[in-house]
């Protein structure tokens, strides 16, 4: 397999000369095509900042990010817009649904922009809607949906977008146990066909990842598969033990306990 994503020595600073926060500290890693990558760490460790930089929503202060060997850190505006549209699929915690469009229209938007035929769009949307159990909310607007329903509409939109890499920020965060299991099964299937980079607070959602990056204070402090990391007796091992004890623990709730 070839490398699809190369993150090289990136750093990210916020603030001004009097007060500077280093959100990312010399982050480097590679992702091969078809890999499923998990990003984990306590609240404030830099997970979302890293994903925002990869998605070009935020810019790096130093370093480079390459997708398909193309440096995306210094693209001009029009090239960047085209790149996001053609190369990336997003699911973030704020859903990013357009309030003026119903569920069906929100899902269809990306496919319409890509030039898919109306009949194909209709068939694909109804197939994914049945899979994610959202057929009954396709005619609703985002403000009429629950948080879990909005999340599943966002998932459907990202799953159907024909792009090589999906960037996900805790995609099961707003779901109950039954819906989480259903979405996790769908995500496992999608991960067989795409490159997936996902932030997760529940460790079980990325247990099967080919590579897990553990962040703390803006640095990658551990890296490997679940089995490799559990055997290191480091932060991941402690968090894994805490989540097994508490069932639904998240990184946010365990931060103080792991200091």
Image (cartoon, helix red, strand yellow):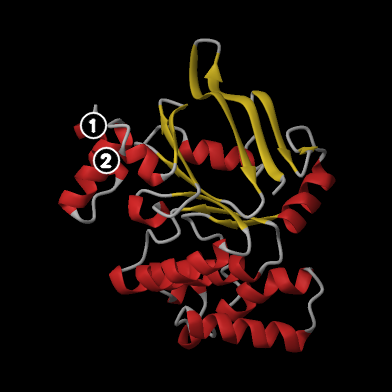
Residue at image x 67%, y 36%? Answer: 6
Count all numbered tags in the image, as a single digit. Answer: 2
Q: Which residue appears farthest toward the left when viewing the image?
A: 245
The reply to whether the C-beta atoms of the residues labelled 2 and 1 are less than 8 Å apart is yes
| Residue 79 in the image, given as x and y percentages of width and height | 83, 46
| Residue 57 in the image, given as x and y percentages of width and height | 63, 43
Q: Which residue is mark 1?
A: 258
> Would you say residue 97 is visible in this rendering?
no
Q: Secondary structure at mark 2?
A: helix
- Vertical comparison of 150 with 224: above or below: below
| Residue 25 in the image, given as x and y percentages of width and height | 52, 22
- Vertical comparison of 27 with 114: above or below: above
Residue at image x 44%, y 70%? Answer: 185
> Would you say residue 106 is visible in this rendering?
yes
- Vertical comparison of 121 with 26: above or below: below
- Whole-angstrom CA distance, mark 2 to mark 1, is 7 Å
Q: Which residue is mark 2?
A: 239
């Amino acid at each position: 397999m070839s490398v699809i994503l190369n993150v090289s020595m990136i750093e990210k600073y916020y603030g001004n000369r009097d007060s500077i926060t280093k959100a990312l500290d010399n982050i480097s890693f590679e992702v091969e095509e078809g890999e499923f990558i998990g990003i984990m760490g306590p609240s404030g460790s830099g997970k979302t900042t890293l994903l925002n930089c990869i998605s070009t929503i935020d810019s790096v202060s130093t370093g480079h990010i390459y997708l398909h060997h193309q440096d995306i850190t210094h693209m001009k505006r029009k090239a960047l817009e085209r790149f996001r549209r053609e190369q990336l699929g997003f699911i973030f915690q704020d859903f990013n649904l357009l309030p003026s469009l119903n569920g069906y229209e929100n899902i269809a938007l990306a496919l319409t922009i890509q030039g898919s035929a109306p009949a194909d769009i209709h068939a694909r949307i109804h197939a994914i809607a049945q899979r994610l159990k959202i057929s009954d909310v396709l005619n609703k607007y985002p403000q009429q949906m629950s948080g879990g329903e909005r999340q599943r509409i966002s998932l459907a939109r990202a799953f159907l977008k024909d792009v090589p890499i999906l960037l996900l920020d805790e995609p099961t965060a707003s779901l109950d146990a039954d819906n989480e299991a259903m979405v996790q099964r769908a995500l496992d299937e999608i991960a067989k066909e795409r490159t997936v980079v996902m932030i997760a607070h529940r460790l079980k959602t990325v247990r099967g990842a080919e590579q897990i990056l553990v962040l703390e204070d803006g640095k990658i402090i551990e890296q490997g598969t679940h089995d490799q990391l559990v055997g290191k007796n480091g932060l991941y091992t402690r968090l894994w033990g805490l989540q097994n004890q508490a069932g639904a623990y998240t990184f946010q709730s365990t931060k103080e306990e792991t200091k």
